Amino acid sequence: MSETVVVVVPDADILASTVAARLVVKIIDAQAQRGWASVVLTGGRIAAKVLRSVKDLPASDAIEWSHVDLWWGDERFLPAGHPDRNETQAREALLDALPLDPARIHAMPPSDGPDGDNPEAAAARYARDLAAAAKPGSSELPHFDVLMLGVGEDGHVASVFPEHPVTYETGTTAAVHNSPKPPPVRTTLTMSTIQTAEEVWLIAAGPDKAAPVGMAIEGTGWRQLPAAGATGTDRTLWLLDRPAAAKVPPRARSLR
């Protein structure tokens, strides 16, 4: 049975260090079990802080980085190397400093990539990449040990926005038009894909996240508040600083 765990720490800096430490341990454990690990990265300020914290952890030296698959939950449909792309920010924060296998870094296609300025084709290409990494005959998706998500002020996760047409997409990936948050065009994993991850980690810092976090943990409908639907098959982990947890009921902080 899947469990939900809510962890609250004092501030955003401690939150980044906490998430980084958990991520390193999760990767080490996955590699001990199977020889490889698969992680879905997110974007945003707190995500960059987490990745920088990973770089500073001595325990990260125990990871065989060439045996880690990296995916992204969503991407801004911008040219390669654009500073607003999640891939660019992740590379600057950590990835460029690691001995990763380039073939195992699965970035979402940019707007100047092989599909040109066609986000539907780019999303379809990413869906094919996911399917190619799945075990033969198992599914359209590889195993994700952990899928990390930031939580937006409106409760969106990845680029799945409240009451947006993307919430009705049934494939593994989708193009997003008219995003309420710039840039307006994006590509994303769908909610059904997010829900296949072994563990989903929802990370939020700051008082502007308090309302959506509290509502999501209480069980609001996910099409109205996508963060409420982002759950892992084994565990859903809410990682919050105190301001973001201000509207989480005390009883929920020990959910299992």
Image (cartoon, grey):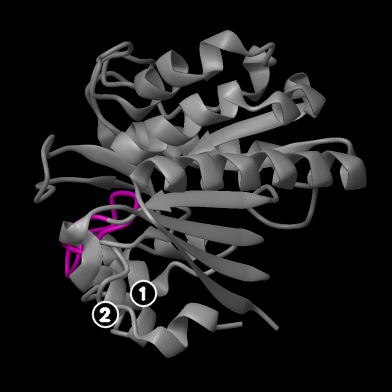
Q: Callout 1, which amino acid?
A: Ala
Instruction: Find residue 38 and report its image quarter.
Output: top right
Q: Residues at badges 2 and 1 in contact (C-beta under 8 Å)?
A: yes
Classify 250 as above or below 204.
below
Q: Would you say 115 lies left or right of 55 here?
A: left
> Could you tell me residue 223's position as x and y percent?
26, 75
Q: Residue at x 56, y 39 (%)?
A: 20
Q: Nearer the viewer, residue 252 or 163?
A: 252
Determine the image quadrant of residue 45: top left
From the image, give the main secondary structure of the stretch colored magenta.
loop
Image quarter where the N terminus lies is bottom right
Gap in angstroms between the C-alphas marked 2 and 1: 8 Å
Q: In front: 205, or 161?
A: 205
Q: Which residue is mark 2?
A: 215
Quarter of the picture containing the C terminus is bottom right
- Residues in magenta? 152-164
| Picture residue at 13% right of the left edge, 34% below the top | 183
Label 2: which secondary element = helix
Q: Is residue 64 left or right of residue 201?
A: right
Q: Position of residue 113 (x, y in %)?
A: 35, 15
The residue sitting at 57% across, 10% down in the picture is 97
Q: Is residue 44 visible?
A: no
Q: Is residue 188 visible?
A: yes
**What amino acid does circle 2 point to?**
Met
Question: Which residue in the protein does label 1 denote?
Answer: 228
